[in-house]
Image (tube, grey):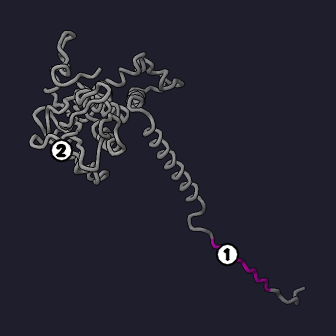
Amino acid sequence: MADEPKRIIIKKVKKRHQDAHGGSWKVAYADFVTALMALFLLLWLLAMISPEKRVLLSQYFKHFSVFKESGQSVIQGHSSLLDRDGGVAAKKMLGSERADISPEMLQERIKGAIAEKLSSLEDQVMVSIADDGVKIQIVDTEGSLMFKLGSAQPTEKARQLLKLLAENISDTANRIVIEGHTDSLPYRGAQITNWELSTARASAARRELEDNGVEPSRIARVVGYADQELLIKDEPTNPRNRRISIILLKEKAAQPADTAGPDAQNPAETAGTAVK
């Protein structure tokens, strides 16, 4: 055995190239995508609920205690906010959280929104700062009507404008006055005159604003002036005299309506035709 030749054994080892970070990054990426999807879903759900419920939800998490309220739902834990009047407490909190916007900022906001989204109707909207607040006037032009002649039914153009206005004033706290105006062309049909027509158009504008998010409690008054306050006095029949005026009252201008007692005279009855 001593004379047996030595055998040399050669062992070949194949090295496998592995990923430098393994597969852990895939798990982290999947968690990130899942969290991102949950965030977008939450934002979408918050956008779908009413402002009152958003306030209710914010109050729930602001005062939440895992020891006191574990296992309770948002509604059960704060049922006092949802009273028989449709959540008056939540609406009060919502009103207190509305932005305090200056007349100048509000004017620029409305002008910018119209220029961006409804530029084709820009020449039919006048936004100005008056003594009592910000005044928005929606006027007719030749061939472009906000209401059909003799009708209180808003056209599609009027609905688009009123919806855009509602979106830009719903987060403010200003009381609102809505006025209806006609031109001097006499209108009589089934005992309806320009007085009734201007009032009906103002009330139609009110409904459009309320349907698009403006709180009904913010409406201070709705009046019709017929042709008694012409925009273009030298041309009583000019179509621009047919208009809806929406006034966002300053705080001082709104105080008389807020502090008036039950026996006080309705301001709408002293100027124009009051809404029935």
Residue 238: percent from left, percent from top? 18, 44
Mark 1, other Cα within 10 Å: few <14 / some 14–19 / many ≥20: few
Q: Secondary structure at mark 2?
A: loop
Q: Quadrant of the C terminus?
A: top left
Nearest the eye: 259 or 200: 200
Residue 9 in magenta stretch: yes
Left or right? Give the position of 65 relative to 127. Answer: right
Count of marks overlaid on the render: 2
Quarter residue 235 falls in: top left
Q: Residue furthest right?
A: 1
Nearest the eye: 143 or 83: 143
Magenta region:
8-17
Whether residue 238 is visible: yes
Q: Which is nearer the N-term, disc 1 or disc 2?
A: 1
* Image mark for residue 238: 2
Residue 64: percent from left, percent from top? 43, 27
Residue 142: percent from left, percent from top? 24, 49
Residue 101 in magenta stretch: no
Residue type at mark 1 is: Lys
With respect to residue 22, does 50 lie above or below? above
Q: Residue at x 22, y 51 (%)?
A: 123
Q: Which residue is mark 1?
A: 15
Q: Residue at x 19, y 29 (%)?
A: 225
Left or right? Give the position of 224 relative to 63. Answer: left
